[in-house]
Amino acid sequence: MRRTRSAAIALASASFGALGACLTLPGSLLPILVVAFDVRLFEAGSMLALQPFGYLVTVLASRRLIARFGARRVVSGGLFVFALGNVAFGLVSGWVQGAAAMLFGGLGFGAMEVAGNSLVLALGGARNTNVLNFVHLFFGVGSLAAPAVVTHSVAAGVSWRWVFVAAGIATAAIALAWNAIADVRAAEPSAHGAAVPRSRTVPFLLAAILGLYVGVEMGVGAWLTKFMVGRHAVELPYAGNTLSAYWLGLAVGRFALAFLAHRVEEATLLLGLSIVSTATLGTAVLAGSPATAAIAFTATGLGYSGIFPAVIALGGRYQPENAAAITSILIAGAGVGGIVVPWLMSFIADAASITTGMVFYAGMGAVMAALALVYRVLSSG
């Protein structure tokens, strides 16, 4: 049983690593995609928003999918659909077809996200916050490695299309590997931290926090290279390195929290990281030099590192008897935020400037910090 559980955690880590790498590809190559598809920023943002829309559809259906097929099979199937979406995006000829490929891939992403987090939450037991940070560390590893690799590769002459095809093939291999292990039983639920408020509003408050977090974190990742190229007139490889540094901050933070998260109560950790990430993002956006912006974006990634695992862990302690149900509610909030926040930003960027759009992201981060403060007050009351 221990060997099966270890194999499941290892595969979950590989799965989130593949997700992290694949999800950064459109943002990393956005300056290239805008030219290749001959689109405005609003059209590019709308294309990218189709992925979280598909994500939301399967997030809402994931509870029933998990009940019928089991978390392991839903993870495998979701990864495979996500892989096909990436391959299809690499083969399309226009942005409308690209949007359809994004939508299709998002369907798989949503199924995998809920099932994968439910599985990890159940496997983590008394230290599920640590295990969640460990597994999501690999999301950061994939996210930090991919931008530098693909931007330098494309700058050296590799077609952006082959980048998406190769990413899809690698993800499909991980999907198939899930079929080689057996289903695993849940460990004992966590009792770590202060008591979770029993108010019925708590799941929706946590879902709102997660929605703002995902909308801003992924939105910054999607637009960072375009922002650096447009505001600071840097070359694409420099912008790609900055994006990798942003995800490096997230990976480093999750690596540390994989060992230390149990020492800090989740509500306190959530509030502190929300404040730090908001302050550093504002600094990055308003920085006068590319070097200062790169440093501040790295610190922003560090601030974002433990927010997602903390919210999922808090949800797991709110409803420990049904991890899939509470996780689907929280990640539905993430899905809504992933659609609405970046779409609004693309509208602002097209109507005003990309810098104004990034300031909007910092504002949404401030709202997230305010909601984290509300939750902290409720949990201590």
Image: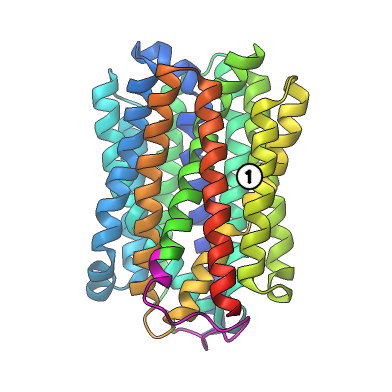
Q: Residue at (26%, 75%) from the top-left corner? A: 67
| Local secondary structure at mark 1 | helix
Percent position of residue 286, x then y: 67, 26
Q: Which residues are magenta?
A: 186-204
Residue matched to label 1: 278
Q: Is residue 20 magenta?
A: no
Q: Is residue 353 left or right of residue 228?
A: left
Q: Position of residue 182 (x, y in %)?
A: 40, 76
Residue 10 in sight from this viewpoint? no
| Residue 241, quarter of picture | top right
Q: Residue at x 51, y 78 (%)?
A: 123
How far across and how far down the image is residue 235, in percent?
Answer: 65, 13
Amino acid on which the number 1 mark rests in the picture: Thr
- Quadrant position of residue 321: bottom left
Taking the spot 34% from the left edge, 44% from the top edge, the residue there is: 52
Against 213, is 13 above or below? below
